[in-house]
Image (spheres, rainbow, N blue to C red):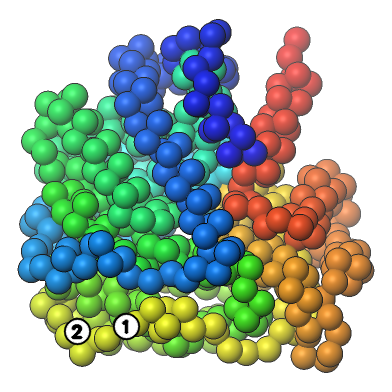
Amino acid sequence: MLVNIFSMATRRATQDAGLIVEAPVLPRFEGILSSEALAFLEDLSHRFAPDIYEALDRRTRQKERLARGESLDFLPETAAVRAANWSVNPLPRDLERRTVEITGPTDRKMVINALNSGADVFMADFEDATSPTWENLIEGQLNLRDAVRRTLSFDDPATGKQYRLNERIAVLVVRPRGLHLPERHVTLDGIPIPGALLDFGLYFFHNAQELLARGTGPYFYLPKLESHREARIWNEVFLFAEETLRLEPGAIKATVLIETLPAAFEMDEILYELRQHSAGLNCGRWDYIFSFIKTRQDDPAAVLPDRSQVTMEQPCMRAYTQLAIRTCHRRGVHSMGGMAAQIPIKNDEARNAAALDKVRADKLREVRDGHDGTWVAHPGLVPVAREVFEAHMKGPNQIDRLRDDVRVSAPDLLRVPEGTRTEEGLRLNVRVGIQYIESWLRGQGCVPLYSLMEDAATAEISRAQVWQWIHHGASLEDGRRVTADLLRTVIDDEMRRIEGEVGSDRFRGGRFAEARALFEWISTNPALQTFLTLPAYEALDRGSKDAARENSP
């Protein structure tokens, strides 16, 4: 588990000194894993891994305080930062218009399609949309290196179709993994380094100077921060990286995803810490819902209704997004709207029209509230989102809408969403959770399920919600309590349904038994697992090693 791995860092190992790559370095990987790049990564890890470990310890201590009955609130010690008049540094020209951003994994075909989608920005995602197999991570770095240099191409052997970059492509932004995720395949003094440093370090080292020479820059999205002190770590990483490559301070720009409940109370402070490098904030709604459950896991009064009922119209979600807009615009920077998880539905005109209507309504709410752009998960939604935003936002952004009318208190952010808990909601959580985990264990981190694009964030909601219902003995609307026994009965039913949907051959040839066991374990364990991807990473790593042994001569 993560805490056990990272807590080892307090004891310096006596063997395996220095940075060691403990995975195959295939010939095509050698350019990414050059001695110079690894030396830079070693310096990054020596300097900043201890700070990351301490940040994770602070998260644990805060969890313990909340379990004792403390409540989140705006920090009294940083009141002066919130009250003062200051702004972030000006943005580069190619980040002024971010009307539509598309996100997705870093495989070759997906990168080409996203860059060609007509979106203003493509966020290449090493985090929630990527299963962190060694091949996925390093191939992703290769793909982004080629994309930066406009040499990226793909010839599909199955269809013969050729994929090439258009003359005009989206601005590239990269999301490294969160601070909590280790990279088991690279160790420093015997300890796995933070995955965030690997993802950031390799991309920055190979591409920063090339990006600046081409009139853009090294741009990033920062996920799952929980405090301004964690933002400070990233700011110091950026300054060190810029100095090492002899770039001007502030060349890096980063947008922080406000996708944890604690971070919602520190938006001003996060922008302040990153003000030299900030490109604003984004409302990462799905992880935010998961964080709401996780942060308030010990509170029986904070049990949520069905996932589908926790919409952006819930008062706590309205408070969070409007506070983000007010905060960003006061500081002169973008506030980005969240993900539309719908995807186009083929061969069903009525259902497809209904899905697009949901996207339009979501984007209309965002642009009317004052967001400066939005996210979509599929190229087919880019025109829909752009049409709505450009009808109501006449310039490249609407940062001049200060939203001084917004007043948000701690109780507003902590208000529990209202609604019902249903058997179908429980069953949907089971189906989505197990199928997503199974795909993730096979190396696929972005999965279309039931007309929605699911990634790790939405799967986290599914499993955490089941745990919360069982842990607090919540009742469904028909009066039945949600228990471990009920869950196992539901899982039996849903496994049969999943087999019927995917086919027996695919079911038997997949990793569904492992996915079921993991989902059941994390849903019924007395302690809520901090992140699904931590125990799943252990299973992913075991599967990779087993496959390597099977394929070895």
Q: Residue 176 is drawn in which quadrant?
A: top left
Give the CA distance from mark 2 to mark 1: 12 Å
Q: Residues within 10 Å of mark 2 (few under 14, many from 20)?
A: some
> Identity of the amino acid at label 2?
Arg
- Across and down, in percent, residue 332 comes to 12, 67
Q: Residue 299 is drawn in which quadrant?
A: bottom right
Can residue 446 be seen by looking at this rendering? yes
Q: Which mark is residue 553?
A: none
> Identity of the amino acid at label 1?
Val
- Above or below 498: residue 553: above
Marks 2,1: beta carbons within 8 A: no
Q: In the structure shown, which secondary structural element does the residue marked by tag 2 occupy? A: loop
Point 35% across, 86% down: residue: 365
- Across and down, in percent, residue 59 comes to 48, 51
Q: Residue 261 is drawn in which quadrant?
A: bottom left
Of circles 2 and 1, the one toward us is: 1
Q: Quadrant of the N terminus?
A: top right
Relative side of 152 to 455, left or right: left
Point 60% across, 52% down: residue: 530
- Above or below 24: residue 351: below
Point 15% across, 80% down: residue: 402
- Above or below 122: residue 29: above
Q: Which residue is mark 2?
A: 403
Q: Which residue is mark 1?
A: 408
Q: Nearer the viewer, residue 335 or 479?
A: 479
Q: Nearer the viewer, residue 113 or 551?
A: 551
Relative side of 523 to 245, left or right: right
